[in-house]
Image: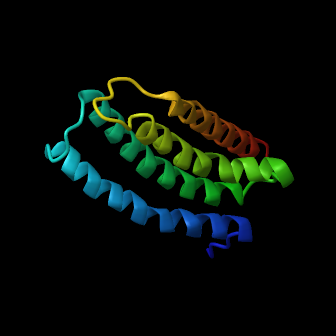
Amino acid sequence: MDLVLSDASRITAGILLLTIVTIEFGGTFMLRVVGGGMPLTGFQKTFFRAGHAHAGVLVILGLVCQLLADVTTLEAAWGTVARAGVPAGAILLPAGFFLSALGAERTQPNQLKVLLYLGAVAVAAGTLTLGIGLLTA
């Protein structure tokens, strides 16, 4: 069986694969964090760990979604939501974790925590749309 991706899925998957380099860079940052090489609060360490973990997991899920989206009958806006929801969340959720924890001695998230909610909505929209698309295909 040959795997043939639509142009939209091929391009999105290619971009997602390129983002793995940034996740690797985040891994070197996390090594410094957990090794005590950076003066951070417990809150910051927790949020940085969560941001790194969400980035990796959501990029992988985003790649899987590209394959699944191509076997649905979703078109136009619904197809875009199914393909782009999880990848958008893969950007927004980690950004929310990292950016809302920035600042010396921070013990609570700043206003950029709104990115966490936007990312969660993006992932939910993408997975719900794709799931319904698969069930109705």
Horizontal side of residue 45 vs 127, given as left or right: left
Give the farthest residue toward the bottom.
2
- Which of 6/35 is in front? 35
Horizontal side of residue 14 vs 107, given as left or right: right
Q: Quarter holding the N terminus?
A: bottom right
Residue 120, quarter of the rendered image: top right
- Which of 19/96 is in front? 96
The coloring applied to the image is rainbow
Residue 4, quarter of the rendered image: bottom right
User: Percent position (x, y) of residue 58?
Assistant: 49, 48
User: Percent position (x, y) of residue 79?
Assistant: 78, 52
Q: Is 62 above or below relative to 45? A: below
User: Percent position (x, y) of residue 102?
Assistant: 38, 38
User: Percent position (x, y) of residue 63?
Assistant: 55, 58
- Residue at x 65%, y 55% (from the top left corner): 68
Q: Is 25 above or below relative to 86? A: below
Horizontal side of residue 121 vs 43, given as left or right: right
- Residue at x 20%, y 44% (from the top left corner): 38
